[in-house]
């Protein structure tokens, strides 16, 4: 089964992108998780390596469908890695198991390809972006730059927003995704914000109510970009959601506090009408497509 998946992936990348790719399994007996897809630049020398972390429920193949970013990073000389963590596509990203799994994948790829002296970048979409920022905050070897596409950062806010959504009256059935996320956050944080707020501070890459700003202080010298498309009317009309339910609330606070603490390389990039999901180009502001990929890569490559 692993060979079939690898052949299909290699055929896809070769036929569509003209680039070589491999799938590496840290556990040779399990082809469902704890692995990574690697896309090679077309020529040497490489300009560095980048980890692109999928959103919740996404595979590497899903990422290739939604964005050309992996193709373009490889074409610009960056060895490109798309991980699948120990929890598989249901990885929570900011939990200790996901962070340990990311670290193990990085150790494996840097050892295999002798990348110790190469520039390292990291980014991701949605909870994959949360994972990237959390890793940058705690990594021994800091990435040269980090970016995130509309990530949830404050899981106290996320939890309370999901609870409110279920509580409010509506014509449609209860949002099952919010029910799942409430249970998952309680599991990962070992309680609710009322019973274990310190755990929420440890779990979250940023916490509005944590006045110590403990997480932020670890990336005061790291270039950071967050992308968001705050189409409030779309969320009101299509999801019965408002600004309090949107990740941009804490994303803007996160960048603001970094700036005020002295990180002048922290930026919030806001877009309009760029969020569409393939293959049907369905409108959705929470999408990989809100990023100008070429401009992002240019920004990454000028960082030192």
Image (cartoon, rainbow, N blue to C red):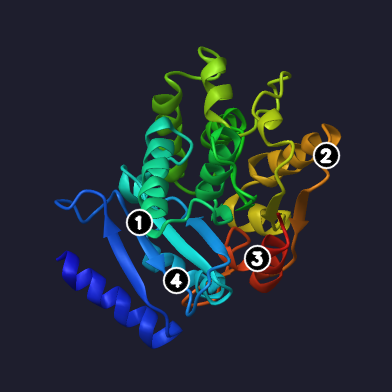
Nearer the observer, 14 or 33: 14
Q: Which residue is mark 4?
A: 64
Nearer the observer, 225 or 144: 144
N-terminal of the pair, mark 4 or mark 3, is 4
Can residue 30 be seen? Answer: yes
- Label 1, label 2: how many angstroms apart (C-alpha)? 37 Å
Q: Which residue is mark 1?
A: 112
Q: Above or below — where is 191 with respect to 247?
A: above
Q: Secondary structure at mark 1?
A: helix
N-terminal of the pair, mark 2 or mark 4, is 4
Q: Which residue is mark 2?
A: 259
Q: Residues within 10 Å of mark 2 (few under 14, many from 20)?
A: some
| Residue found 44% across the figure and 60% down from its top | 81
x, y percent for residue 252: 76, 43
| Residue found 44% across the figure and 50% down from its top | 56
> What is the quadrant of the C terminus in the image?
bottom right
x, y percent for residue 148: 61, 52
Horizontal relation, residue 176 to residue 302: left or right: left
Q: Which residue is mark 3?
A: 290
> What is the quadrant of the N terminus in the image?
bottom left
Can residue 174 be seen? Answer: no
- Label 1, label 3: how many angstroms apart (C-alpha)? 33 Å
x, y percent for residue 78: 54, 67
Q: Residues within 10 Å of mark 4 (few under 14, many from 20)?
A: some
Disc number lying in front (2 or 3): 2
Nearer the observer, 143 or 135: 143
């Amino acid at each position: 089964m692993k060979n079939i998946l690898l052949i299909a992936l290699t055929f896809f990348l070769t036929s569509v992108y003209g680039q070589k790719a491999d799938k590496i399994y840290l556990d040779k007996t399990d082809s469902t998780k704890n692995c990574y897809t690697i896309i090679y630049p077309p020529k040497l020398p490489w300009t560095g390596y980048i980890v692109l972390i999928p959103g919740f429920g996404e595979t590497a193949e899903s990422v290739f469908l939604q964005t050309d970013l992996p193709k373009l990073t490889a074409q610009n000389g960056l060895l490109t890695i798309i991980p699948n963590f120990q929890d598989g596509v249901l990885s929570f990203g900011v939990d200790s198991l996901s962070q340990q799994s990311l670290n193990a994948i990085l150790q494996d790829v840097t050892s295999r390809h002798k990348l110790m002296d190469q520039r390292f970048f990291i980014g991701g979409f949605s909870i994959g972006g949360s994972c990237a920022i959390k890793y940058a905050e705690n990594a021994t070897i800091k990435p040269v730059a980090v970016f995130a596409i509309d990530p949830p950062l404050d899981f106290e806010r996320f939890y309370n927003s999901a609870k409110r959504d279920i509580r409010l009256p509506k014509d449609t059935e209860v949002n099952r995704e919010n029910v799942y996320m409430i249970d998952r956050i309680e599991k990962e944080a070992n309680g609710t914000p009322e019973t274990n707020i310190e755990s929420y501070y440890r779990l979250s890459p940023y916490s509005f109510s944590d006045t110590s700003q403990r997480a932020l202080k670890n990336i005061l010298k790291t270039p950071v970009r967050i992308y968001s498309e705050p189409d409030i009317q779309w969320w009101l009309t299509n999801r019965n959601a408002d600004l309090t339910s949107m990740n941009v609330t804490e994303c803007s606070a996160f960048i603001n506090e970094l700036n005020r603490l002295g990180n002048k390389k922290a930026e919030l990039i806001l877009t309009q009408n760029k969020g569409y999901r393939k293959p049907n180009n369905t409108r959705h502001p929470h999408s990989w497509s809100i990023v100008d990929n070429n401009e992002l890569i240019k920004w990454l490559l000028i960082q030192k």
